[in-house]
Amino acid sequence: MELDTDNAFAELGLAPDATEREVKAAWRRLASQWHPDRNESAGAVARMQRINQAFEEIRRAGFSGRPGGNADTPATPDGDAPDGAEADQAAAASGAAGTQRQGRTLHRKLRMTLEQAASGCIKVLRGKVTDSCAVCRGAGHQVLGGNCARCGGSGAVPRRSFFGWPTGVAECEACLGGGIARQACAACAGAGKMAPRGYKINVRIPPGVRNGDLLHVDGRRVSGEGPGADFEIRIEVARHAFFELDDDGTIRCEMPIDGFAWMANRQVKVPTVTGLQTLQLSRDRLSYRLEGMGFPVQCRGQRADQVVTLVPIFPQQLSTDQQILLDQLSATTLGAGEEALDDRLRAWSRGLRGWKAAMGPDCS
Ligand SMILES: [Zn+2]
Ligand SMILES: [Zn+2]
């Protein structure tokens, strides 16, 4: 887009006979209003570019020979506005980097359930990325060569007090002290970076990732609207309500069970990371090992075992029917004689008899 000088004045909201001082004041006012670091509206970058081009055009025309026609390039506003909590701060391309992608790694976190971590899953990752400007390679300006007009190439300008008295020298803002003429980059409006753009990628999480694992994703292999960068993704596995994961992949689960169902050798459903499994209870055991139903021993590896530990729960309140049935059940063991007893009970009865005998006849 080429501006003629009259249009350039109009772009800055000035009459064609505006002085250099008025041009610079208008540029500063508009730049502080439209610089993309301060103005998040969609048209800010384009507007800032037009403002800069207008200024450059008027400067190129030499301020039409007006008083004080010392054409120098104003410094662009500084300041690095954060892109918001959701946005990634992409490392700016270093001076040696040949392409945008090289050396850029976005750091993200992905949270998932233990079940998702065990089986693997696909997660959608959204964010924003800010590309550094390809034209000026992130510098925000282009070096024109020759002496800086503002400082005459010295890199320093007189510092003045509030009342205008010289009080020393300061670094020249126009050339950042380098003494070489430069101008704000038009492509990025001097920001050194482009407007943030959104990305959305699908990340395939392999089975067996652990909390705290770092997953490296090659930016060239992502599906979706990629940001042109690699990812380093920290895995966060949420704590589970009833599964505990051991380092060796064993999953432990403590499970309350109806005490009567346990005594009756019932079949029950137990949860695993891949769904419910049928477990045949046995009243002589409280601990059960489900082979191959645990967490992968290592990423993409075979699954370890799950250990289910039962906690039999007997009702504290019994219905009348239950009390009658329990009385009958108890009578069957009491009336069966000592031979029918469990070894442990028989040993206890024998010990008790011996103890009574040793206590003598006074013990009744
Ligand atoms: Zn640029
Ligand atoms: Zn200078």
Image: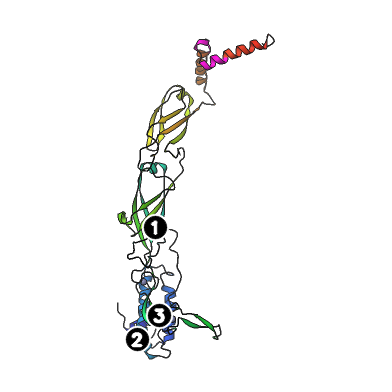
Closer to the eye: label 3 or 2? 3
| x, y percent for residue 241 | 47, 39
Which residue does the image show at 50% across and 20% down from the upper left?
A: 321
Question: In the figure, 199 relative to 310: above or below?
Answer: below
For the residue labelled by badge 3, is the local secondary structure a helix, a strand or a loop?
strand
Q: Which mark is residue 180?
A: 3
As rendered, which of 177 and 327 lies closer to the eye? 177
Task: Name the amino acid type tagged 1.
Answer: Leu
Q: Residue furthest top?
A: 361
Q: Which residues are magenta?
A: 334-348
For the residue labelled by badge 2, is the local secondary structure a helix, a strand or a loop?
loop
Q: Say if residue 336 shows up in the picture.
A: no
| x, y percent for residue 294 | 40, 36
Q: Is residue 54 left or right of residue 38?
A: left
Q: Give how far apart the Cα atoms at labels 1 and 3 are.
A: 35 Å
Q: Is residue 32 left or right of residue 362?
A: left
Task: Name the amino acid type tagged 2.
Answer: Ala
Q: Which mark is residue 61?
A: 2
